[in-house]
């Protein structure tokens, strides 16, 4: 794998990841773009929950459902100057032009004693990762080598962004489908480097710490072992990974994918885990698409250990979460009053049934 670093017209970084080390990656961005630092979001402290809320009003200007001939993630050609100056590419990562968190005010670290009215610059970083130069594919269509290149880019960004000062958590994720608010159709994911530990992870770590105090064991190790032992919701298992629908799934279709080995970050994947993941992840996504014979709208991302928090590593463990709002061919799950206002989830699908449906579709797809 070769990584080439370049810069866009407004100074943002762009990284090309290639399997073919001879591919030229030298084209300059010819566009006339306003300075990236002009747009800056803020974040405000919610005293009622202890959460930080990013307020990114400048993101309202971003491109919304462009036609393919205006796609900012397709390669540049004679008729279209996109975010990617090259006329071809494999996998590309670049800084988001409309970031919710940006490095413009790096150094202004987060206040440790926030109170009502606390507001500060949303420091951090937001990047976009495009999985393919082709506009109409998805992770499901990538072969093992192409998927491996995406994973290599994930690992590279995890390692680099977690080293930034002000960054407490690197989140690699994908929203897919207009149903979950995706504004660009081109196959891509995102990487957020937050200046705080997000609520989900903070709560997970607090549960894990309490579990450790009670049982002197890792909560996530035990959850994986218990799901394997129960063997009721497992979709797929090999020598390195297990995928299952969690016992208390909230979403109609929800998957957790865990390495069998306790590791805390994508950067710790060994060769066997890497190759296995690159082989079956596209197949897993394809089996989801086959549930209702159309691309399943989903939100998916990696849970890793926080950055710059050595004390949190002991209770962390790497895993991948994927959740879908689709509950039947024609019906979506909406986060209504109980979920949105109270955080009390009501699920309409039995987790064991969901696991059975996905497992059936997964098994139908022969390993290529
Ligand atoms: Zn495109």
Image (tube, grey):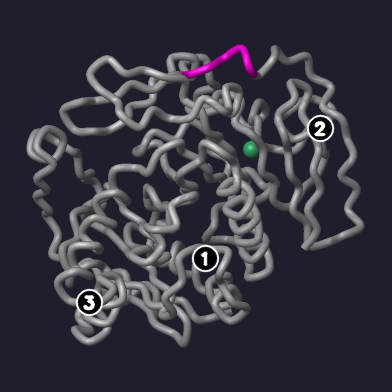
Report whether residue 293 is seen.
yes
Residue 362 is one of the magenta-drawn residues:
no
Q: Select label 1 or label 3 by which is in front.
A: 3
Q: Of label 2 and label 1, which has the lower sequence position?
A: 2
Q: Give the range drawn in magenta.
A: 37-41
**Which label belongs to residue 216?**
3
Q: Residue at x 42, y 30 (%)?
A: 110
In the structure shown, which secondary structural element does the residue marked by tag 1 occupy?
Answer: helix
Query: Which class describes the residues within 10 Å of circle 2: few (<14), some (14-19), or many (20+)?
Result: some
**Which label belongs to residue 77?**
2
Note whether ligand 1 is within 8 Å of mark 2: no
**Which label belongs to residue 250?**
none
Q: In this figure, which residue is indicated by the disc labeled 1?
A: 282
Q: Which residue is drawn at 25% across and 74% down?
A: 223
User: Left or right: 209 with respect to 142?
Assistant: left
- Count of marks overlaid on the render: 3
Q: Residue at x 76, y 47 (%)?
A: 16
Q: Of label 2 and label 3, which has the lower sequence position?
A: 2
Q: Where is the N terminus found, in terms of image quarters? A: bottom right
Q: Of label 1 and label 3, which has the lower sequence position?
A: 3
Query: Which class describes the residues within 10 Å of circle 1: few (<14), some (14-19), or many (20+)?
Result: many
Q: Select label 2 or label 3 by which is in front.
A: 3
Q: Is the magenta stretch mostly helix, strand or loop?
A: loop
Q: Which residue is drawn at 45% across and 46% down?
A: 169
In the structure shown, which secondary structural element does the residue marked by tag 2 occupy?
Answer: loop
In the structure shown, which secondary structural element does the residue marked by tag 3 occupy?
Answer: loop
Q: Distance between the residues labelled 1 and 3?
A: 37 Å
Q: Select label 2 or label 1 by which is in front.
A: 1
- Quadrant of the picture in which ligand 1 is shown: top right
- Residue 314 sits in quarter: bottom left
Q: Where is the C terminus found, in terms of image quarters? A: bottom right
Task: State the image coordinates of residue 14 (x, y, percent, origin top left).
Answer: 73, 38
């Amino acid at each position: 794998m070769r990584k080439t670093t370049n810069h866009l017209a407004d100074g943002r970084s762009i990284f090309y990841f290639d399997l073919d080390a001879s591919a030229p990656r030298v084209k300059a961005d010819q566009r006339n773009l306003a300075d990236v630092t002009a747009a800056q979001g803020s974040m405000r402290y919610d005293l009622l929950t202890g959460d930080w809320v990013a307020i990114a009003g400048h993101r309202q200007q971003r491109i919304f459902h462009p036609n393919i001939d205006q796609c900012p993630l397709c390669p540049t050609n004679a008729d279209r100057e996109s975010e990617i100056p090259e006329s071809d590419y494999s996998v590309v990562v670049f800084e988001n032009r409309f970031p919710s968190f940006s490095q413009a005010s790096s150094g202004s670290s987060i206040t440790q004693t926030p109170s009502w009215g606390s507001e500060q610059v949303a420091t951090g970083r937001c990047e976009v990762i495009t999985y393919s130069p082709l506009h109409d594919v998805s992770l499901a269509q990538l072969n093992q080598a192409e998927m491996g290149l995406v994973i290599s880019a994930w690992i590279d960004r995890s390692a680099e962004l977690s080293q930034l000062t002000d960054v407490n958590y690197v989140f690699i994720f994908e929203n897919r489908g207009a149903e979950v608010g995706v504004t660009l159709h081109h196959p891509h994911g995102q990487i957020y480097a937050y200046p705080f530990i997000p609520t989900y992870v903070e709560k997970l770590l607090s549960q894990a710490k309490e579990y450790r105090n009670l049982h002197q064991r890792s909560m996530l190790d035990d959850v994986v072992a218990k799901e394997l032992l129960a063997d009721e919701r497992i979709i797929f298992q090999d020598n390195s990974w297990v995928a299952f629908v969690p016992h208390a799934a909230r979403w109609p279709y929800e998957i957790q994918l865990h390495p069998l080995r306790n590791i805390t970050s994508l950067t710790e994947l060994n060769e066997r885990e890497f190759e296995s993941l690159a082989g079956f992840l596209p197949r897993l996504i394809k089996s989801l698409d086959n549930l209702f014979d159309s691309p399943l709208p989903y939100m998916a991302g990696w849970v890793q250990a926080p950055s710059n928090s050595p004390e949190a590593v002991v209770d962390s463990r790497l895993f991948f979460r994927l959740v879908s709002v689709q509950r039947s061919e024609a019906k979506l799950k909406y986060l209504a009053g109980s979920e949105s206002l109270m955080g009390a989830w009501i699920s309409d699908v039995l987790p064991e049934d969901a696991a059975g449906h996905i497992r059936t579709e997964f098994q139908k797809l022969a390993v290529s």
